[in-house]
Image (cartoon, coloured by chain):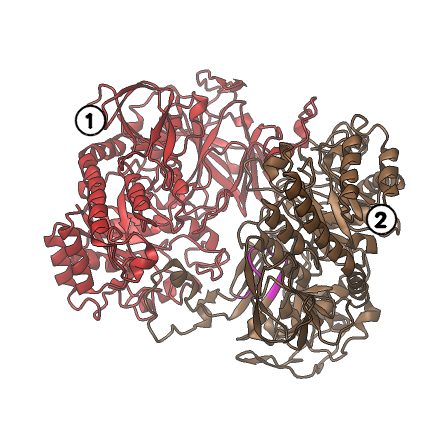
Chain colours: A brown, B red
Amino acid sequence: MIVLKTNSNLIRSGIAGLFIHVMLAFTSIVAAPNAQELDPLEPEFSNIANGVWKVRIGEPDIFRPSNFRVAPIQHETLDTMPAEQRLPFNLEDFEIKQTARGLLIYLPMIEGEDWYGGGLTLSHFRQTGRRQVLKVTSDPLVADGSSHAPVPFYVSTGGYGFLIDSAREIEICFGGHNRLELDFAASQEAAALGISIDDLYDTRDNPVSEISIMIPRSSGADIYLFAGPTMRDAIQRHILFSGGGTDVPEWGLGVWYRGFTRADAEGIRKLADHLQEDNIPCSVFGLEPGWQERAYSNTLTWSRTRFPDPAGTIADLSDRGYKINLWQHAFIHPDSPLYEPLLDKSGDHKVWRGLVPDLAIPEAHAIFTEHQASLIEMGVSGFKLDECDNSDTKSSPWSWPDHAQFPSGADGEQMHAVYGLLYMRSLQEAMNGQPTFGQVRQASAFCSPLPYVLYSDLYEHESFLRGVGSASISGLLWTPEVRHGGDGDGLVQRMAAMVLAPQFLINAWYCPIPPWHQPDKDKNQAGIMLPDNERIQLTDRVRTIAELRMKFVPYLKKAFVNYAATGIPAFRAPVVDHPEIEAFRDVDDAWLVGDDLYFAPIPAGQSEREILLPPGVWVDYFSGEKISGNQTILRIASNDLPPIFKRFGANVD
Amino acid sequence: MIVLKTNSNLIRSGIAGLFIHVMLAFTSIVAAPNAQELDPLEPEFSNIANGVWKVRIGEPDIFRPSNFRVAPIQHETLDTMPAEQRLPFNLEDFEIKQTARGLLIYLPMIEGEDWYGGGLTLSHFRQTGRRQVLKVTSDPLVADGSSHAPVPFYVSTGGYGFLIDSAREIEICFGGHNRLELDFAASQEAAALGISIDDLYDTRDNPVSEISIMIPRSSGADIYLFAGPTMRDAIQRHILFSGGGTDVPEWGLGVWYRGFTRADAEGIRKLADHLQEDNIPCSVFGLEPGWQERAYSNTLTWSRTRFPDPAGTIADLSDRGYKINLWQHAFIHPDSPLYEPLLDKSGDHKVWRGLVPDLAIPEAHAIFTEHQASLIEMGVSGFKLDECDNSDTKSSPWSWPDHAQFPSGADGEQMHAVYGLLYMRSLQEAMNGQPTFGQVRQASAFCSPLPYVLYSDLYEHESFLRGVGSASISGLLWTPEVRHGGDGDGLVQRMAAMVLAPQFLINAWYCPIPPWHQPDKDKNQAGIMLPDNERIQLTDRVRTIAELRMKFVPYLKKAFVNYAATGIPAFRAPVVDHPEIEAFRDVDDAWLVGDDLYFAPIPAGQSEREILLPPGVWVDYFSGEKISGNQTILRIASNDLPPIFKRFGANVD
């Protein structure tokens, strides 16, 4: 590989949102010099794919996410993209300091540009002006960067992005830090005295001047740069670099139902009967912890008490046309046959008194994967991988601490950053080429090729909607699953919001009876059914929505095929396609689906919403009304159908 | 000082909540050996006061909170305490590892003991089973250890405590970490399958086995140990070690009113007229940012536009019998006369385009303090020290980053940990012996001798009540200040909850008219008064509560005098006095005041509450009813008066 020492290969100047790029002109092409000859912190550029550069700074950690990539760089597809190689940042743009805290990097920002990414963010979307710490947590209640799936990939509306290949809890700030040496003048005008907290803190004109990146406990890192020319191109290049987008089987796009955790074989049979009697389409039936002998931690073996004949249960569900998905986490209960073999291949802390297999070492990976394969051989089509994230803020934190140690050399912090990736990688290998689609509660960089959606125990609906667009920036999938509805309207509204989501998942794990028989959680658990007329009416409404989803399965499948082929996310916040339009920069509750649909669900509990239509001409999917884009329209929740728009002239049924 | 190498000087064994302590028996008394001769991580014990030990581990950071103590160890008072020296932990109890992350220390826990402390905690109280990161923040929305005032002091119901003298963001966990090597057996009984998230995560029986302490980015620390014999004794010893408890002037215990930030001299005069016309007692009048020429950042000079005659305004308020308190923060605006002198004595990041003076270096401290003294000379009696905490999670984070650097050698993380202490220390020196009482938004270890209450922009009332008890464990003061009430009942209920709080503060900084003229914030800001009859009625209710507070001033003053004399907090969660009674361990919404009063306010919006009375015999302060303690009683919000109980036989008016 040729290492390019770049100098002045780009003039990057900004005038209020305008970007002037000049063609890349290599001023020197030199062979890689000896490390000794270089300032160890001088970044070393190499062009590793079309529009993708690696910048090596110092001595990167040995344990890093790229070690665990599941698919190679998709050079062939990258080569179909614009070849014009515009470097997002110059060598001189990198200001680097090795500090006692870790590696500190400053990069310039340009006035008017906005930054997005950081993986799944549920509390916010736009990153400009924010300070984030990329910490894995199961409880991302505040907009501090903690998330089920933090990804140190960021992309600018200016049409370029970067990925930091580090498993550390990176601290990153897009403006708002005001270094003394940069000597910004105070604004000459005295601001009006604030009379609200927002006034005081949100409207002060902090200069948005530069990006600061602190990679703690590290003395180096590889940073990958992705060219555009557009924001979407940069996202696409990052995904292709990461191994490409995922495809999923058509059955995975149908309706999922996860059954009551305490149900035994007979209980599961009854739930399946309900689905069929109610004529609710279902493609995948999920079993929750109760399928196992011990759960929390896991044996990863069938409970012979609740499921005396697992093969019979699987056969019954398969005969009904359902694929079977099994819940699990990776923490190995002392009663599991995996316990002894994994004992010396696990971290030095237990979780729920179970082992944490070090899936970064081949021996643990092999033992774990082989056992998973035995479950698949029984006829299981996929898995829900729970609790591979982290827990700190609960009254009883359950995961391993950041200072834990693993045989692979990773500490707890690093292992948290990639445990979902390692876990999915194992299951993917166990599937042995068989198509699958599952759920996972932690993801990271290099996860785009993996057919899993993220989910959360948080249940606030606006956050749930926000996740679809925010996750997709980093090549991840998220779905606003439904558990209970509160009432019938809430249930239907939450289901309607999944009609064009990556997965249509009714996660009734704590509901003894289907939520359309009783949408109130407590009453459901008490076994109190709705009165017959209400139940029948609600069942009809739920069926209508589920059937609407089914109608879109071919379209969604096509969108996924396209995602896998091109690396362009199938689900996209509108800013991705229209970064030049300011008004889209905070739209985090609507998304584009494939090429031709725009989906703007009405959040649960709300009776109407405003919808800013993307540019172009659109057609209301249900009424057929033709509407000019680039305008805001109002939609009232007048029936159960969610607002869907198709591009005028597009061929969507 | 004699360094004691302790071995087996304590047998610490636990049987379900029972503690067996044996007398300290020094097995060896040796002079301090050379560092070279020791395992650098072997803790070195020294007895530094009666029932207080210092344990030095490795090489502590140079920059640490104890550098900035404002008062010496109160040996004289400590010597009046039980001399029986029982070491909370043995030398062998300390398991210490130097890791790449920092210094890791394990200490044993005993079944049945509960831990408290960590400074101000608003989201939770009991620390047992929890994981915390002691990070300074202005937005402590989750129970993760972040707080306006984290203090690494913890105390056990077993009757001992410890303080870590570090300005790092310590990660600490009281149980819940389950090290593999400790080999806890899995429970033999299979737990029932959880059907709620609480079931899943909160009831799993994580072994509560040991305390883990990670001091990041450090290779050593001093840990101070405090003996009991009771929990309250350990708290008291920590406070006496820290310089003792604070006394406050009697006027500071009266009613405080902070005026509208946009009010000019005339506006302030009118507000003072309102207070007098309405016959609302007031002891302190606070001016908000508007008194300054520039605010956000600060000039720390009077606005000649709004206050052409500051001395006149001060004289007017003084003549009415009000003490004057000025809002400020420490960030120095370029227009301030302090800017140039402090330019090379400040951190390398600005805040709101203002300098952050490094108050840890004598030169900056002197310049800053001298200027503050000039304000005091004009007749100001105290200050509100705002925004000395930190901001990360807002959409526009405003404080310096953790990776900032200061001339004193501190990085941003360390400076955040002690900035409140440094700031108060400067003001205390500027007061030059004159009694004061103020507000501060950040505090740390070694702050107990400083006459300031903590406050927050968060406004959730149950969190506000929780702060009184949680802060007091670490020798800090907090008050559930009132800003607006929503409605009249809310206003009165919030005021009633301050009748026996450390400070009675009506912080009407964003209210153009007094909140009893309009308790709804938006209407208040729009200048819409309540209808006359409602306003008169509400004013009467507010006056009744304010007068009730005034009635308690002598009692409260006595409680503070006692606090200053003994180090026993004047306000205490009941667990402090009754750690042996399980039922008190989660009581975080009621507190003991001095020796003889128990205060259990009804949270805003609630119509009743249960009150667990401490042991003994109590008398309902208002009805005179005699009630046996150690039982739960119900109090209905039938009038505006908060539930107050006095100890039977005590002499309280």
- Mark 1, mark 2: which one is toward the viewer? 1
Residue A232 percent across, percent down from the top left: 69, 71
Foreground: B612 or A333?
B612
Question: Which residue is under mark 1?
Answer: B652
> Can the viewer see residue A358?
yes
| Quarter of the image where the N terminus of chain B is located | top left
Where are the magenta residues, as a range? A116-128
Q: Amino acid at mark 2?
A: Glu
Q: Please state the chain letter of the residue tagged with numbered disc 2 in the rendered image.
A: A
Foreground: A361 or B85?
A361
Q: Quadrant of residue A27?
A: bottom right
Q: Secondary structure at mark 2?
A: helix
Chief SS of the magenta region: loop
A612 in relation to B151, above or below: below
Label 1 – label 2 distance at C-alpha? 75 Å
Question: Which residue is under mark 2?
Answer: A429
Q: Please state the chain letter of the residue tagged with numbered disc 1 in the rendered image.
A: B
**Magenta residue check for A118:** yes
Residue B165 percent across, percent down from the top left: 44, 40
| Quarter of the image where the C terminus of chain B is located | top left
Q: Secondary structure at mark 1?
A: loop
For label 1, the crowd category at 10 Å Cα-Cα, with few meaning under 14, some 14 to 19 and many 20 or more, is few
